[in-house]
Image (cartoon, rainbow, N blue to C red):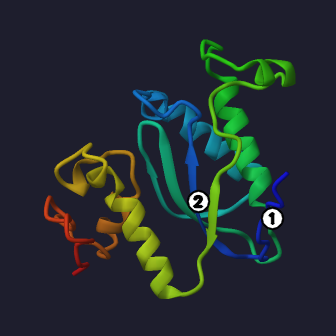
Amino acid sequence: MSDYRRAWHPGGTWFFTVNLLQRRDNDLLVRHIERLREAVREVRRRHPFAIHGWVVLPEHMHCVWELPPSDTDFATRWRLIKSGFSKVLPATERRSAVRRGRGERGIWQRRYWEHRIRDERDYRAHLDYLHVNPLRHGLVKRVADWPHSTFHAWVARGVYAPDWAGSDVADGLGKRE
């Protein structure tokens, strides 16, 4: 059995990657984007957190959150977001015998990846990574063309140029202006 441990840091800022269980040819997250957004809104009402960045792709998502100063519990938030989203979808997915036996849906991978943001450089790198992700996955020709991203809010604030990281990112991330 693995000895998997989560890092707990009150009020921390975190980067997350959360995946659907079936990633191949699956567009569930963007097909039901409003249901996902509602699940996030509901969890934030009961368990506040700040969203610094978020991108939803067809079968996975990346985000940067900041927890309240005395709070370390991102795990409960993810459990509630995943279950809230799952409950509003019809149960049409294939489920393994183990998942059926546990009464689990077959929508999400059980785990997710988290990384505590260490400093401003780390923060900027993770925001760049999540915003450029639709381009890297070949979903768009320009970052600005992907609708399910906080990139547009950051452009409105003047942090990114509207044409940031166009189609020329093969050699790494585009530079912010």
Where does the image place residue 16, in percent across and percent down from the top left? 58, 59
Q: Amino acid at mark 1?
A: Arg
- Decide if residue 33 is on the left or right side of residue 171: right
User: Nearer the observer, disc 2 or disc 1?
Assistant: 1
Give the residue at mark 1: 5
Which residue is located at x 14 percent, y 64 percent? 168
Which residue is located at x 32 percent, y 50 percent? 134
- The secondary element bearing badge 2 is classed as strand
Rendered view: 56 above or below 122: above
Which residue is located at x 59 percent, y 34 percent? 21
- The secondary element bearing badge 1 is classed as loop
Rendered view: 152 above or below 164: above
Q: Amino acid at mark 2?
A: Phe
Give the residue at mark 2: 16
Where does the image place residue 164, in percent across and percent down from the top left? 21, 68
The image quarter in which residue 38 lies: top right
- Decide if residue 137 is on the left or right side of residue 127: left
Rendered view: 8 above or below 167: below
- Work out whether residue 47 can be spotted: no
Residue 71 — which label? none
Q: Quadrant of the C terminus?
A: bottom left
The image quarter in which residue 147 lies: top left
- Decide if residue 117 is on the left or right side of residue 161: right
The answer for how far apart the CA atoms under marks 2 and 1 are is: 15 Å
- Work out whether residue 4 can be spotted: yes
Contact, mark 2 vs mark 1 (Cβ under 8 Å): no
